[in-house]
Image (cartoon, helix red, strand yellow):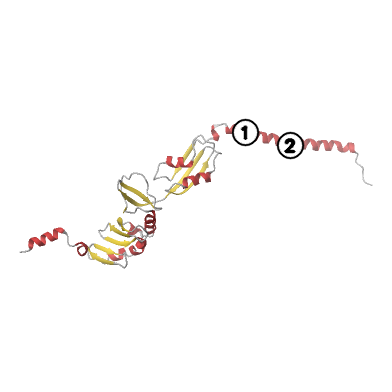
Amino acid sequence: MDKVIDIEERIPTLRERRRKRTNRKFLALLFIFLIILMVLVYSQTKYSKIQTITVNGEDLYEETEYITASKLDVGDSMWSFNTEEVAGDISELDWVKNASADKKWLTGVEITVEEYPAIGYLEKEAGYQKLLANGYAVELPVDKVDGPIFTNFETEETRLELSAQLEQLDPEVSNMLSQLILTEGETASANITLYMTDGNEIRAKLNSLSEKLDYYPSLTAQLEDGQKGVFDMEVGITFRSYDDVYGPPKEVMEDEETEQP
């Protein structure tokens, strides 16, 4: 026969369960209240504000350029911005290849940038500008020219093609470039003249420059000692000495005239 439990015996148990359930709800509400209170107090302290903004990887421009582009200021809330949006704003700068932004500890922001590398110097009437791999000419004065000089590359198309061709060059050859002059045309197939550090001159098409210059070391190895001249690479590849192209040096001609009876 089943035992019958009196309702009076169950009431204390029900009351205990109800009391525990009420206590849990109260503790949960108290915890939430304390969290909200802590957030409110924290938001009013200096520890919720940006105290430092650092920039890594900058070379072409001062870090202030990147901080301005980030749209952040010391004193802004650490929680008022999205790091991906900040990185996107900085990446819109013409000379920036990649950018990232990270929150460091509680009060710091660290910005890291990768600038486009310089491929040489664009010659302008007022001086020289660094030319970057993406065709952008840095609008800052240049104190020292320590790379190839590019003359008459006025259009973005020719600068981009120039960059693409130089990127494919063997370092042995690219280190020998002294000056590149665009002599005719304003497209990727423009004619250019190159002056090399070893004293030779090259005439070529811009869009086939890297392909033809690959042969340059082996071509110069076939020249006689001290022989210098012009390599024409516009169609095939031919070589003529400077005497054949421009005539003998003036000093030599004067000596020959003096020797005539």
Q: Position of residue 180 (x, y in %)?
A: 31, 56
Q: Which residue is mark 1?
A: 38
Picture quadrant where residue 176 is located: bottom left
| Local secondary structure at mark 1 | helix
Give the class, few, some or many, for how many residues have Cα within 10 Å of label 1's Cα (few <14, many ≥20). Answer: few
Q: Which residue: 47% across, 45% down?
A: 90
Dots 2 and 1: beta carbons under 8 Å? no
Drawn side of residue 121 relative to residue 257, left or right:
right
Q: Position of residue 139 (x, y in %)?
A: 37, 45
Q: Nearer the viewer, residue 23 or 120?
A: 120
Picture quadrant where residue 163 is located: bottom left
| Local secondary structure at mark 2 | helix
Name the outermost residue toward the front. 185
**How far is the residue under mark 2 from the one under mark 1?**
20 Å
Drawn side of residue 261 relative to residue 170, left or right:
left
Q: Amino acid at mark 2?
A: Lys
Q: Nearer the viewer, residue 244 or 49?
A: 244
Name the outermost residue toward the left. 261
Residue 152's label in the rendered image is none
Please state, as top left, top right, bottom left or bottom right, where the C terminus lies in the image: bottom left
Q: Amino acid at mark 1?
A: Met
Q: Nearer the viewer, residue 6 or 138?
A: 138
Q: Which residue is mark 2?
A: 25
Q: Position of residue 182 (x, y in %)?
A: 31, 57
Q: Position of residue 209 (x, y in %)?
A: 34, 61
